[in-house]
Image (cartoon, grey):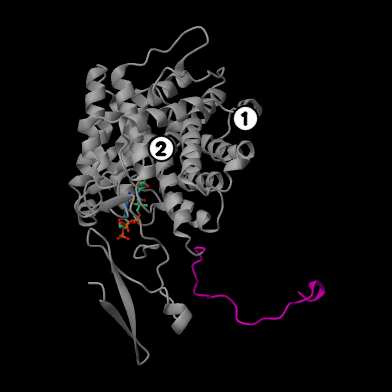
Amino acid sequence: MADEKAVLSIRGKNIEFPVHEGTEGDVAIDISKLYPDHRLMTFDPSLASTAICKSTVTYIDGEKGILRYRGIPIEQFVTDKPSFIEVAYLLLTGALPTLDEREYFRRQLTENELLPEPMRLYFNNVPTTAPPMALLSAAVNNLACFHPEFLELDNDDDFMEISARLISKIRTIAAYIYRRTHCLPFMYPNPNLRYAANFLHMMFSLPYSHYEVAPEIEDALNLVLILHADHEQNCSAATVRVVASSRANLFASCAAGICALWGSLHGGANVEVMRMLAQIHEGGLSPEECIRMAKDKTNPFRLYGFGHRIYKNYDPRAKILHAACERVFAILKNQNDPLLNIARKLEELALSDSYFVERKLYPNVDFYSGLLLRAMGIPTNMFTVMFAMGRLPGWIAQWKEQHDSGGRIIRPRQVYEGNTLSDYVPMGQR
Ligand code: ACO
């Protein structure tokens, strides 16, 4: 209801607040005037109950396990098999492209798939042991040096042009990170290949031997990228928005998003899942021991790939990825991949354990994605880079909403618990 109010009663005062309701029934109490008018704050350290924006990009219902991009359920992207590029366009503009629009966008990507030559050489000068996510965030930020004309974006044509460049170049950057960290020569992109196939070519072709991309592998990669493309106000998207709110440019904001994604509680969990499965396979850990450690509150270990801030039901992306895993392994005649069997066993144990059932902890997107990437030949240290490649259109769409909202700088408050007024003590008297 437009004029609905929420009332807070504190210290003998009743304070009224406006209430906002989203198109899917989300209800938010607008406390933005709480501090300016009353010198009071709310305390929500992990922002679990705080909406930082209004958004039209992605909708999640965590109780029901629903995820929609611009209103379209992600399951429809599995049955109708659009390309990642089409889904990126949808996220960026709010509408599916017509055939002409898709072809134009595709051309923009193709024309921008090369890296500036000094950037390609930059990869020669980093250690082969460099963490891929450090290289990725640095390279995306570095693109600003080569595109100074896009540091300020004030029209939609420039926005789409630089979005296409970024989405195209991150693929080349990701492949070059792999080539460098594996001491392999760089392969230039092939303009005749589609997004996912072109990436696999840059990853796995050799100067003397062209990598033939199997259609089922190309489809699986396309699906992985689509399923990672956006997820509303997660840690990295919220980071992009915070940085954007200071009016920082798109490159800097996305580079910050990449850094946030790196952590093991967020995108880095796909690496941890694989480590955990490999450790079990090598006999260092049993599935039962894994579950026991995850439940032990004195142990920092987590069942990686399980649990989610928003989903209190099966993450719909995990469901699709699990099915895709089974499909791809069957086609590749590799159904007995020991790690897939271990993942199945862990899931079975967790979903019948009261700790996980009571807390509504289900597999999330990271539980099965790594197995699929592994089947494509992508090494574990590249998994989070793959996540970032998929997530980029979402970050860009979130950046644009933040930018276009003309909103104030995002600047939370704190409850100060440090020393009260104290005197400086000169060095000789300490
Ligand atoms: N293993 C063991 N216990 C868990 C796990 C897990 N994977 N996830 C949550 N819990 C426990 C919490 O410790 C908490 O227990 P308590 O009630 O006894 O204190 C309870 O379940 C509820 O946790 P939440 O409040 O729902 O968790 P939160 O929202 O703070 O964290 C997170 C979400 C970070 C995803 C968490 O579930 C986790 O650490 N999972 C493992 C890492 C992972 O897979 N991350 C990827 C998430 S998806 C993504 O970012 C792409």
The percent coordinates of residue 272 (x first, y second) are: 40, 39
The overriding secondary structure of the stretch rendered in magenta is loop
Q: Hey, which quadrant is residue 376 in on the image? A: top left
Residue 401, visible in the rendered structure: yes
The residue at the point 30 percent across, 38 percent down is 96
Who's the residue at 61% across and 41% down the image? 149
- Disc 2 under 8 Å from ligand 1? The reply is yes
Residue 271 position (above or below residue 176): below
Q: Quadrant of the N terminus?
A: bottom left
Quarter of the image where the C terminus is located? bottom right
| Residue 71 or residue 105, whichever sits in front | 105
Dot in front, 1 or 2? 1
Task: State the separation of the CA atoms marked 1 and 2.
Answer: 22 Å
Provide residue 24's location: percent of width, then percent of height: 22, 58
Assign a secondary structure to mark 1.
Answer: helix
Residue type marked 2: Phe
Give the amino acid type for the residue marked by disc 1 in the picture: Met
The residue stretch that appears in magenta? 409-430
**Mark 2 neighbour class, 10 Å CA radius: few under 14, some 14 to 19, many 20 or more:** many
In the image, residue 276 lies at what x, y percent? 37, 37
**Label 1, on which residue?**
119
Closer-to-camera residue (318/159): 159
